[in-house]
Image (cartoon, coloured by chain):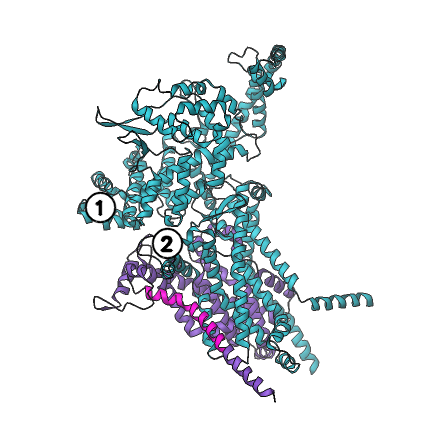
Chain colours: A purple, B cyan
Amino acid sequence: MSKEPKLRSKSGSIAAYSALVYVVVIFFAILAIIPFWYMFMNATWDSYNIQKGIKLWPKLFKDGRFLGQLTDNWKNLTSRASFSFARGFWNSLVISVSSTALTVYFSALTAYGLTVYDFKGRKLIFTIIVGVMMVPTAVNITGFYRLMHGMGLLGTKWPLILPAIAAPSTVFFIKQSLETSLSKEIIEASRIDGAGEFFTFNRICLPIMLPALATQGIFSFLGSWNNFFAPSILLNDANKTLPLMVAQLYGDRYQDYGAINIGLSASVLPIVIVYAFLQKYIIQGVAAGGVKE
Amino acid sequence: MARPTNQNTKRKGMSYTKFGYIFIAPFVIVYCIFSLYPLLTTFWYSAANMQKTTAAFWGFSDKDVYYDRYLDVTPILIETDDETGEVVFDGIKEYFGVSQEDYAKIRYFFSIQDQVDINDPFDAERLKSIVKLGPKDGLITKATIDKVQKAVDEKDLSYIDVAAMAELTAWDDQYSNLLTDIQGALGFYNSVLKDQIVEKSSDSEGEDGEEAAEPVSITAEDILSNAGFINLPENVSDEKVTNEAQRAFYKYLASKTDYETLEEYFTAAQEDSAMLSDPTFYYIIARLKNPNACYYDAENDMMKDIDKITISFDKDLQNYLIENSWVDIVNSEIPTYAEIDKYIGEGDGDLHDIQDQLMEDVQKLNDYGIINNIKLVMDEEGNFAPSENSKENLVVLLQEYKDKNFYPDQTEIDSHNQIAAMQDYTRVRDTEVGAALIADGIKVDKYLTFGEKNLNIDKYREYKKLIKLDQAFTYDKYKEADQKTKDREIEKANATIKEIEPQIPELQKKWEANKPELEAQYDKLDPNNPNDAKLLKQFTKEKYVLRYADTPDDKYGYAAYFKAEDAVTVAHQTIKLPAGIFKSVNAKDQYVMVGFENFNTIFNRTKTFNDIAGAFVTTAVMWIIGFIPQILLALLLSAWFTDTKLHLKGLNLMKALMYLPNVITAVTVAIFFRRIFSYSTGEATSAAQLVIEMFGGERYNFFQSAWATRLIVCFINFWMWYGNTMIVLIAGITSINESLYESAQIDGANSFQTYTKITMPLLRPILLYTMVTSMIGGLQMFDIPQNLNMNPALITFNGSKIGSITTVLMFINKQAFGKQDLKQVGVASATSILLFIVTTILSVLIFYLMRDKDAAKAAKAKKLARKAGA
């Protein structure tokens, strides 16, 4: 008898509860993107208007030109010798792509070696890899700088590319996924067919590992693309990456807020576009614990 | 059938294992080279004496170039006769086979290179400013602009000839810039603070454990009994001063005290010695000694300076005051020169962030008379006031800067700095040596390194070859010269010993014979005589004897004896450890391993300790404040997102949006937030200020407040990472076995109970993972604080001022790679090692605290059981 009204009130309270949940969730979703929206909108305004009020809508026309102010801002920005978007973008791309390729391939190779072959010291090496995963990469920076100087690589892109071959955390996560996805029968079958070990790895196992590699690759790429500490120390002017170019906007050298905002936007936009396409995989990757904070 | 196959695979399996090594080889090799080896060398450097290593430490592989640059052998190898000034020994000729004139070409090269490193005359951006700004007011001719353009293109300043340079200089004088003036004045303040206070106070600490030089034994009594001071009231009395302006000036000074006239003030001071440690007292003395004040002289129609007054005890008094008041003032209230250094150093900080604090500090320095560079001007009524127009008046300049909400025209500053750089460059380049080189057809410009972090060694070697010194100054030659110098020192020392040692017994006898005379003198001192009483109080008998034994005519034979004794001791020391030529280079050939000295430095020198400990504390505080809301919100959102009763829709989109900030470049985020929270007083302003005004509040300078700045960093961290934590937690919750929830529901548990009894305990490993990774990431915090504000507001930590958002990595970065001349590689490495240790300890600790206790117990029981069984 008394069951029914209770139930109704319960479902009513659930509706109210979900409404509250929606409000909070939507608030935080908006909070997450509003700064970027504001940044993009600012890029279409001139310095004076940006500082006069909060512009959450674009300025579409200037002197009859569509997005005229945006193009003006861009011209003002790129006329500076210190900010070359194209060069920064290219340097970032070269470093990120090559270091990601190295990380992914050699981590897969290492993880494969550790999973498939039962050699002496395998467990010890894996334990060490898990141990050093936690070591902050920045602690050896003085020694690393010195080594790079000794090798004559200072200022070039190499110090940011070559060490990517050894990425302990990537090895760890690839090995974890390998243990479930790789069956030894395939390797055995390949061996019986007379294939060499490298052929087996490159042609047969690597394609099987592809999903795991893709996830790791995305994070490796993002990490490299957003990296600031090491590049700021190691690179010379000609090899500056996009974050270093952006960091130069700090200085208040030119009080052109329009130009600053378009510079910032230009560095954000490629990531946002890539993220829009890959967000599903990225979030799956994070959920799988595949990213180091 | 089965057996052979089995054997076959076994054998094959055996042979396959070697591929395991091959497959992991690249990883292991690269890891060892690029991570392990640098880590070990960092350990090594942390124990090496590299506190004074110059930037050239990094260029140490080319030793000859290094010594060419940093070791000027002239003062070591050229010995001249003290009286005639003639060269008696030319080591450069002797050891290197090169004349002094030729060697000067190397010194010449590096004197220019040093100048270039300080101020690059080919800074493309700044040169562009000249080209851009130049034609605007028509003061610069097209021809000159073309010359500048050509110089930029060809990297050869000789295109800018004398006429063009003169034109540029004249044009530059048109542009005086507020910021340049402020920086100039700040620079002056900085140098005064550095010279007079900071160096003094660190001297008195005796930081190297060496005995400080003769301590200043002056006391308040000494000042009070000093004739100069006793006469002061009379010297400033109205009868003595006839000049009206002078009298007005004294009256102005007296107005700083509680007394009517200076005469009364000084009379009172003689009775009350406490007054001497009042900063005002020094302000008055300093003004009297150097009035830096002027008045209008109607007769001659000109401004005339106020006469100074001679005070004989000035230096001692200054020392006394420095010890008694300045150090306290500066240490307690005013940021030391290092902080001011930041404002002027690179010039790319925003002075608006710290203008109020800076102005307050500067005002204090002026009030205390520590820095006395504001000119006082007398008005028509005979009152003195600080000159309003003076360029040195930092308070006035800062006020103007603040009122106008001044932002510099960077083009003007750039062109000004550029012209200065070019002038300096041509000045050091166009010397006699330079002319000689040009006569030989060598243009030094071609071989210098412009606008790069490190010297281009190849270009220098080319130059060295051209001046034909590449064979003369090799590393081996340097070593040889070092050895020869050492031999020579030993030889000389032996000669000294041979000559002087035999004389010592006789000299000693003479001194011992005279000693009783002085001892008798001490015994005769009368405790009732005030002068004698003071001596008795100050010296023991032994010290008295030594103090008065050294007379100008050396009648006791004391000086002769000890001089001989000293000379022999030094000679013996030299034989044991000759100095050689390398001693004067900062970074030694092989840096000395000092074990834990860097750590000692860190823990014993308060300033360094505070900087480092402060950086750790700052980092930890900012991590915690960001992490707590981050984990709480993530827990809440993940609980909602996994609550099947709620049937939320569009979750994937929400997740994607909330994760977005995490993938964006942190540098971009930091700089954008800097813009959002920046402060200005004018009409145009930033978003945060507009929001505050919308709610009727007053504008707030976030970056001037240490905690506001910190909270902004914490907010950014929170904002960038809660989405990440949330997704990890959702994954953790969804991986929990569904049947657990079902049985809980059957048992009648509500949502809250299920959450606390099932979800939370099972989520513990994930929480641990999140916490550890976040902590390690937090300890490496760098991008955001570094780009949010390079000159953050200061915060007091353990009694000294530190940057409010200076993290550990920012500190390491600044010590090892900052632009300052001395790279503290040892300290930076030691800090890195501390970071390494702290990280390791914390992760082990958290793993230990949060480990699954039941599992651990079970394991332990199993172990015990096994033991019992055995």
* Image location of residue B593, percent across then percent down: 58, 42
Point out the image quarter for the N terminus of chain B: bottom right
Magenta stretch contains residue A112: no
The lab-note entry on whether marks 1 and 2 share a chain reads yes
The residue segment tinted magenta is A18-44
The kind of secondary structure element at disc 2 is loop
Is A124 on the left-hand or right-hand side of A272?
A: right
Assess disc 1: are there few (<14), some (14-19) or many (≥20) residues with their C-alpha within 10 Å of its C-alpha.
some
Horizontal side of B600 relative to B674 (left or right) equals: right
Where B480 falls versus A265 (above or below)?
A: above
Amino acid type, callout 1: Lys
Q: Which of B347 and B2 is in front in this view?
A: B347
Query: Mark 1 or 2, which is nearer the eye?
Result: 2
Q: Looking at the rendering, which quadrant does residue B570 occupy?
A: top right
Q: Nearer the viewer, residue A202 or A9?
A: A9
Q: Residue B417, located in which quarter of the rendered image? A: top left
The residue pinned by badge 1 equals: B147
Look at the image and say whether residue A33 sits in the magenta stretch. yes
Task: Tell me which residue sits at (57%, 70%) in the image.
Answer: A175
- Disc 1 on helix, strand or loop? helix
